[in-house]
């Protein structure tokens, strides 16, 4: 308690008191977004649909009561609410709705002395690419060693054709076949290396968000020698 006292020449006096608290330097709270991870992607069926996620975080105050921390979550969409950590320093925000696009989640924790901590995570909400193998036709049979042409359509609501990653594989043998790019919505390649028997050839299209879609020939294609005609 501090007291100020003044005395005039006639000996009359007046005083006033105030109480102040002196604390050691404030140690800032520590916080982190635990889930989703930074750069995590979420798939939605179409661009008009929102994804609803739960954000899990941690927050603690090294020199105070952790349960007194106020934690808020926001993004470019707006505020997603406020909460206080439990005694085990965990805090959770449910029903966080995000539309299509790239969003930065921002977590801010403030202790009772005004110290703050900020953590962030970027999430990508987008549709998966679409693909469909169109060639060869169902039930096609080829001579062993002859060239076999494959073709598939590919598209993505957010990405240009040039940004799509293509991978053709023979799932039967585990052999990588081609990574021919998508041109005009179609990816094609020709191979003469298919072994005899059924071949499950599959194309996988991956977009810039890391989301993928796959399509296989309608029926595993057969590659073998033509039957021998008996006399």
Image: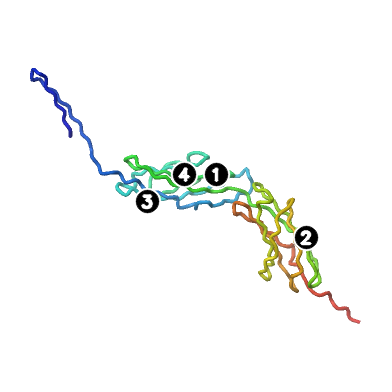
Q: CA distance from mark 4 to mark 3?
A: 18 Å
| Image quarter in which the N terminus is found | top left
Q: Which residue is mark 1?
A: 98
Q: Which residue is mark 2?
A: 135
Residue at figure coordinates x 48%, y 47% from the top left: 94
| Image quarter in which the C terminus is found | bottom right
Q: CA distance from mark 2 to mark 1?
A: 38 Å
Numbered disc 2: secondary structure: strand
- Mark 4 nearby-residue class (10 Å; few <14, some 14–19, many ≥20): some
The x, y position of residue 65, in whole percent, is 31, 47
The x, y position of residue 20, in whole percent, is 22, 35
Whether 156 is drawn above or below 166: the answer is above
- Mark 3 nearby-residue class (10 Å; few <14, some 14–19, many ≥20): some
Whichever of callouts 4 and 3 sits on the residue coming sooner in the sequence is 3
State the residue lying farthest toward the bottom.
Answer: 231
Q: CA distance from mark 2 to mark 4?
A: 47 Å
Which label number is shown at residue 106?
A: 4
Q: Nearer the viewer, mark 4 or mark 3?
A: 4
- Mark 1 nearby-residue class (10 Å; few <14, some 14–19, many ≥20): many
Whichever of callouts 3 and 2 sits on the residue coming sooner in the sequence is 3
Which label number is shown at residue 125?
A: none
State the residue lying farthest toward the right.
Answer: 231
Numbered disc 4: secondary structure: strand
Q: Which residue is mark 3?
A: 89
Numbered disc 1: secondary structure: strand
Q: Which of 112 and 91 lies nearest the eye of the viewer?
A: 112
Q: CA distance from mark 4 to mark 1?
A: 13 Å
Residue at figure coordinates x 48%, y 39% from the top left: 79
Whether 31 is drawn above or below 201: the answer is above
Whichever of callouts 2 and 1 sits on the residue coming sooner in the sequence is 1
């Amino acid at each position: 308690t501090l007291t100020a006292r003044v005395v005039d020449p006639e000996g009359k006096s007046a005083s006033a008191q105030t109480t102040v608290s002196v604390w050691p330097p404030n140690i800032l709270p520590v916080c982190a977004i635990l889930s989703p991870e930074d750069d995590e992607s979420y798939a939605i069926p179409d661009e008009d649909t929102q994804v609803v996620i739960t954000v899990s975080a941690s927050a603690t105050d090294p020199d105070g009561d952790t349960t007194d921390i106020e934690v808020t979550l926001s993004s470019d969409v707006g505020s997603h609410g406020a909460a206080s950590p439990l005694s085990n320093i965990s805090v959770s925000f449910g029903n966080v709705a995000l539309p299509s696009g790239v969003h930065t989640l921002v977590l801010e924790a403030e202790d009772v002395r005004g110290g703050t901590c900020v953590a962030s995570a970027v999430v990508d909400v987008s549709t998966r690419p679409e693909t469909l193998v169109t060639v060869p036709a169902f039930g096609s049979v080829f001579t062993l060693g002859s060239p076999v042409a494959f073709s598939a359509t590919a598209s993505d609501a957010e990405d240009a054709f040039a940004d799509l990653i293509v991978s053709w594989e023979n799932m039967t043998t585990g052999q990588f076949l081609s990574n021919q790019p998508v041109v005009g919505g179609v990816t094609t390649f020709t191979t003469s290396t298919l072994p005899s028997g059924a071949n499950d050839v599959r194309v996988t299209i991956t977009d810039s968000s890391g989301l993928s879609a796959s399509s296989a020939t309608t029926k595993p294609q057969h590659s073998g020698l033509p039957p021998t005609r008996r006399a």
